[in-house]
Image: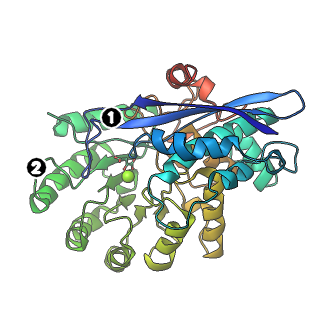
Amino acid sequence: MRIASVRDGVVPIASAIANAYIDFSKMTASVVAVTVEDGAGRSATGYGFNSNGRYAQPGLLKERFIPRLLETPENILAHADGGLEPAGAWASMMRNEKPGGHGDRSVAVGVLDMALWDAAAKLAGKPLWKLLADRYRGGEADESAWIYAAGGYYYPGKGLDELVAEMQRYLDMGYSVVKMKIGGAPGTPIKDALKLDIARIEAVLKLLGGDGSRLCVDVNGRFGLHAALAYGAALAPYRLRWYEEPLDPLDYATHATLAEHYSAPIATGENLFSMQDCRNLIRHGGLRPDRDILQFDPALSYGLVEYIRTLNMLQEHGWSPRRCVPHGGHQFALNIAVGLGLGGNESYPEVFAPFGGFADATPVEDSRIRMPDLPGIGFEAKSALWAVLKDL
Ligand SMILES: O=C([O-])CC(=O)C(=O)O
Ligand SMILES: [Mg+2]
């Protein structure tokens, strides 16, 4: 087993949308293609990319992680089942990297890790979800994944009518749970934002028949404790599906205080990039394993090799993998959700194209989706994404 070649590029995913913390006017993604030869005459090319929210990492890839990946000793790339073991490549990429301070290097490694898993599944002639179920769950995969439609961004000129029309489109596509941004009406102080957001939330809830369990709201880490508590008190009567990233993602103590005062589900974790950071959230964030949602995104956080460490850590702390619903709306996390039995996956029906969204011929029914039976992650079955990746 040998890493034969690695190619990388940068593509734009810029758009005019904004959340409470950033706009996406200059957002980019790294894309990579990794070709692996198995020494028995077979080769496979896997593809990877980073999900939205962090930028492309061409410098880190070219200077450190691609050269180290190409130097991976052949003997650590073999899995006991005869296939490719991405953990060997991961160890090689992380040689001479100190612990802590995960920053953007976890994004660069995550992009390559995704491509390695795509190649591993293609070499095995199986979809990734099946390879994962075979390697880690005695062959047992879920039949489908729960997904929800994430959107509700701030956008120039977007008012209540446009917001409700957007959510209606998601319902028409087969989603029954939707997510919208709050806490960030452009140029609005947080005290005025609450009034505006309650009007936005009530407009969407009306569309959802008043059922709070069908609506998630996302603050993108903008609030301090005071605003998070004030919003929490206002949101509590609606019994929302979840209240996402209310606080700075690394400020665990404030999460613990919020969780004492807000009893409905809290979701967070899309900006935690290592098992160790996730463990600190679990140890110190006061989150509740019977209701809260963990959104660690393998594409941003050193990939699936690290995500498996995170799932093991969660198990040691009494958390079920069903509490995990990864951020990022990509096919990689969707395969992981079905193969490893997570609680579901995010979906972006209208934003972050072509990286958001799933295989073309997989309809959403009652917020659930089935997986195509195609070797690898399934990028080739998503035409808009494949049009970008095939040029690598
Ligand atoms: O707006 C973003 O940065 C993406 C996000 O939080 C999400 O999908 O939950
Ligand atoms: Mg979010």
For the residue carrying disc 2, how many other residues have a C-alpha within 10 Å: few (<14), some (14-19), or many (20+)?
few
For the question of whether residue 300 can be seen, the reply is: no
Q: Earlier in the sequence, mark 1 or mark 2?
A: 1
Q: Secondary structure at mark 2?
A: loop
x, y (%) of residue 194? 16, 59
In the image: residue 253, left or right of residue 226: right
Residue 225 marker: none
Residue 189: percent from left, percent from top: 10, 58
Q: Nearer the viewer, residue 11 or 76?
A: 76
Measuring 16% from the left and 34% from the top, which residue is drawn there? 156
Residue 27 position within the rendered picture, expressed as x and y whole percent measured from the top left: 34, 37
Q: Please state which amino acid type lies under the numbered disc 2.
A: Gly
Closer to the camera in the image, 191 or 3? 3
Label 1 sits on residue: 168
**In the rendered image, the vertical position of residue 220 relative to residue 338, given as above or below:** below
Quadrant in which residue 360 is drawn: top right
Tag in front: 1 or 2: 2
Circle 1 Cα neighbour tier, 10 Å, few/some/many (<14 / 14–19 / ≥20): some
* Residue at position x 40%, y 46% in the image: 54
Amino acid at circle 1: Gln
Quadrant occupied by the N terminus: top right
Which residue carries the number 2 mark? Answer: 187
Q: Quadrant of residue 36?
A: top right
Asked whether the residues under the numbered discs 1 and 2 touch, taking CB atoms below 8 Å apart as contact, a structural biologist would say: no
Q: Is residue 13 above or below residue 70?
A: above
Q: Is residue 268 left or right of residue 31?
A: left
